[in-house]
Amino acid sequence: MPIYKVILLAIVQGLAELLPVSSSAHVVVAEKLMHLDPTSPEMTLLLVMLHTGTMFAVIVYFWRQWKRTYFASSDAFQRFAIRGIWATILTGVLGLALQKVIEKTAFRGVPHAEIEQLFGRLDLIAPALLAVGVLILIAGLRERSVERAAAGRLGETEDLRTTVTMRQAGWIGAVQGLALPFRGFSRSGSTISVGMLTGAARERAERFSFALAVILTPAVVGREALRLVKASHEATTACPVDLHGSVLVSVLGMVFSFLAGLVALRWLSSWLEQGRWWLFGVYCLLAAGFVFGVHRYEDGTAPPSPPCSVLESSIRSS
């Protein structure tokens, strides 16, 4: 893959990661427009490594806040750890169960099918963006309706050492599990919105959501790395997999997404704190329409599938 395409994808990922607009969907659409295959092991690994780069950007940017919130004392860390473990367990259980259900139903009769084969389906990304847009709108409009009362309570009782409740953490973890198989259903947008709808202040839900991303990302990276190794062993002459080249390209993309993420975080942080959460829902609705338009155009102009895309072709025809 040309280096300039990796850099462009990294910039898209870095700029979109902080916003609850599904950076994965933006990267997948960009890959489609650049005639890349988002379902290939090389591209899914690249996407995960781009997430890893922005994960490090999030750690660097939010570290002081997390230190005051989660590491102020052993008691504060224990509260966060219990809630983080609880949420991550729910994410794993629901996410893996949903993945297996999708693989058994959507890929019926297709050998060696994997959930990643759906990641390039713009006709699935569009409704996922639509769904998360509606969720963000509901949470944002509700936040506006109680803004004054919430501001008064926070001014009196907010303690940076506190985190979300166990119930809120459970809902956030469950929705994070639902977000895993679907590109377009923004992980941060859905988890923060659900945290707000269950009574958490947006700042607390945001802190906890990004912290969960840091917990989850290493496991996802490991899974995609194993998938790439497996694909390289099963590769044929017609469909080769460049294992070492894919890893090097992915690391390069991670570096650029880290830098782009830092720029985006510094630029957008103040704007995010102005209570305009609902506007991201409007953006997701508009983005859903755009993605659907790209899908219609792609279906009308796409050339015949190459031999390496037989699985995706069989899924589309099912």
Image (tube, rainbow, N blue to C red):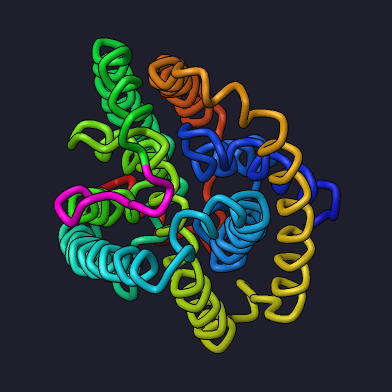
Asked if the stretch drawn in magenta spans residue 172, the answer is: no
Give the percent coordinates (x, y) of residue 24: 51, 45
At a point 61% along the width and 72% down the height, the residue shown is: 239
Viewer can see residue 172: yes
Q: Is residue 250 above or below residue 318?
A: below
Relative to 266, 44 lies left or right: left
Determine the main secondary structure of the stretch shown in magenta.
loop
Relative to 220, 269 lies left or right: right
For the residue pair 130 and 38, the one nearer the viewer reads as 130
At a point 71% along the width and 48% down the height, the residue shown is: 10
Q: Is residue 8 above or below residue 196?
A: below
Q: Is residue 4 above or below residue 111?
A: above
Residue bounds of the magenta highlight: 159-168
Query: In this view, which residue lies farthest toward the bottom?
Result: 233
Number of numbered markers: 0
Give the percent coordinates (x, y) of residue 11: 73, 42
Q: Is residue 232 above or below residue 299?
A: below
At a point 45% along the width and 16% down the height, the residue shown is: 276
Give the percent coordinates (x, y) of residue 2: 83, 54
At a point 50% along the width and 84% down the height, the residue shown is: 230
Relative to 207, 43 lies left or right: right
Give the percent coordinates (x, y) of residue 269: 61, 31
Viewer can see residue 109: no
For the residue pair 223 and 54, the one nearer the viewer reads as 54
Query: In this view, which residue lies farthest toward the front?
Result: 156
For the residue pair 240 and 86, the one nearer the viewer reads as 86
Q: Quick one: quadrant of the N terminus? A: bottom right
Q: Quadrant of residue 35?
A: top right
